[in-house]
Image: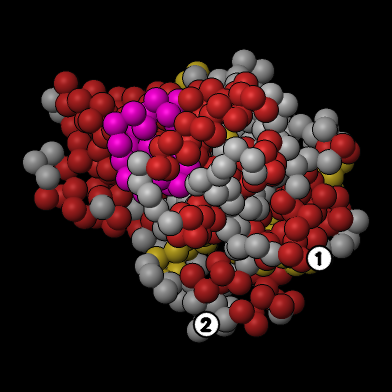
Amino acid sequence: MSTLETLSFDNAFARLPDAFYTRLPPDPLPDPYLVAASPAAAALIGLDATELARPEFAQVFAGNRLLPGSEPLAAVYSGHQFGVWAGQLGDGRAHLLGEVSGADSGWEIQLKGAGQTPYSRFADGRAVLRSSIREFLCSEAMAALGIPTTRALSVVGSHAPVRREAIETAAVVARLAPSFIRFGSFEHWAARNKPAELRQLADYVIDRFRPECREAANPYAALLADVGRRTGETIAKWQAVGFMHGVMNTDNMSILGLTLDYGPFGFMDAFDAGHICNHSDDRGRYSYRSQPQIGHWNLYALGSALAALIGEPDAVQATIEESYAPSFEGHFMDLMRAKLGLARALPGDEDFIGETFGLLQQQHPDYTQFFRRLGELPAQVDEATRTAADAPLRDLVIDRDGLDAWLALWRARLGAEGRPDAERQAAMRAVNPKYVLRNWIAEAAIRAAQGGNFTEVENVLACLAKPFDEQPEFERFAAPPPDWAAGLAVSCSS
Ligand code: AMP
Ligand code: MG
């Protein structure tokens, strides 16, 4: 285990030529204080958990004190925002400190909100406490749900004012990922017609993260296929758990298939396939139901950027079609079968899963509660006790006859497997979380933190570290939005 002073850096990304980034130190924040830190994330980089409480920790992860061996830099990238080419973007408020070799492999540490960079355009390089707590909590919650994601080590706050719709205060999130390279990092060089840099970046990703692609006949097509498969898997996991990324722009799409850049994300409360989690997304480009299609669109943006490397004109399209959709659909079907308590794949499952979403769309039950409660129901009921047995689920809907009809189909499908109830129920509990980061939960923790009380952030972090476990002390976090949260909206403001 390391201390802050003994963390050792090996900055592979900084060994790429200067064209890929600008070296510059973070901008100090006055009087930084620790809001929260994740012991699980600290373990990834081998940082001793007792280090999190040191005053130096807040100084370091506010960007005020540089760790020996770090080489801070901001990376350049471009991208498509809301379907439109946006040109050069880049780390406008993120500083990569370097890469720490951790328990498994290398973890880059990045500070988000640590001041302006050459890529800040007209913005201030800062992030507010509100959005930083959301990113911190959600990164760690997603990891605990088994969804590929960047991680978050800490949130550090300061009284420094930041102007958004209102004046708020500044914060910095320390994020961890093997790499923060985005689809837009490749689009950047393709748009500038710089094939040498494009190749250099692709080679960097292959050599460091996907060496198996080197063995393929066309390594760059193999890389695209890898990204397609992983992106399909990640988005399938989002959909199954009811997570929505609010800004699926290509600059927010990780080349490693990680969930990246938490801004106006959401978890589904009452199910609605048309739900738009980002108040700034007025056309609903990134609605729940659109996300799989957008993943596909984004892969085409990446594919056209890589086309010059891949060479054969038809190969880009073929690679995407053979990787993304089959991966998404295969994972999504497997995940939904598991959520429904089905251990085997049978013909007709696709129709049944379609019926399930039809029911959810008609009745709008709370998505998380629906599956969690379904998992407790018996596979067999007699007519005399059925309504009592099914009451926990029937209480979530208005049209109970509609639900009863669907439950009859579900029971018939379970009957085709004959798994013992206890085994199936345990399996369902292990895949249907009881706790997800609902907006109201994040908001309650944020309001407390804005008032100087960080225990609720700690509580939410602790609860969401075990999303599948019953945790009676945190029962309140399993609830759908209370009345005060009815009008909550999250936007791109961060
Ligand atoms: P996002 O929509 O948050 O992914 O950000 C899109 C682009 O805007 C990225 O290049 C960000 O670095 C940049 N950006 C967003 N907010 C700020 C900010 N407050 N200061 C500087 N750059 C920002
Ligand atoms: Mg972004």
- Mark 1 or mark 2, which has the lower sequence index? 2
Query: What segment carries the magenta color?
Result: 328-354
- Of residue 242 and residue 455, the one placed in the foreground of this image is 242
Mark 1: is the Cβ under 8 angstroms from ligand 1?
Answer: no
Q: Residue at x 86, y 50 (%)?
A: 447
Query: What residue type is disc 1 on?
Result: Thr
Q: Is residue 18 above or below residue 413?
A: below
Q: Is residue 409 above or below residue 132?
A: above
Q: CA distance from mark 1 to mark 2?
A: 26 Å
In the image: residue 480, left or right of residue 179: right
* Number of residues whose C-alpha sits closer than 10 Å to that of mark 2, classed few (under 14), some (14–19) or many (20 or more): some
Furthest-top residue in view? 283
Rendered image coloring scheme: secondary structure
Q: Residue at x 44, y 63 (%)?
A: 107
- Residue 44 part of the magenta-drawn span: no
Mark 1 or mark 2, whichever is nearer to me? 1
Q: Could you say where residue 381 lies in the image, as x and y percent from the top left?
A: 55, 44
Residue linked to disc 1: 455
Query: What residue type is disc 2 on?
Result: Ser
Name the quadrant of the C terminus.
top right
Furthest-left residue in view? 217
Q: Residue at x 40, y 42 (%)?
A: 415
Residue 292 shows in this picture: no
Q: Could you say where residue 277 lies in the image, as x and y percent from the top left?
A: 65, 30
- Of residue 479 and residue 238, the one placed in the foreground of this image is 479
Furthest-right residue in view? 451
Residue 16 shows in this picture: yes
Residue linked to disc 2: 2
Task: Tell me if label 1 and label 2 are in contact, CB under 8 Å.
Answer: no
Quadrant in which residue 194 is drawn = top left
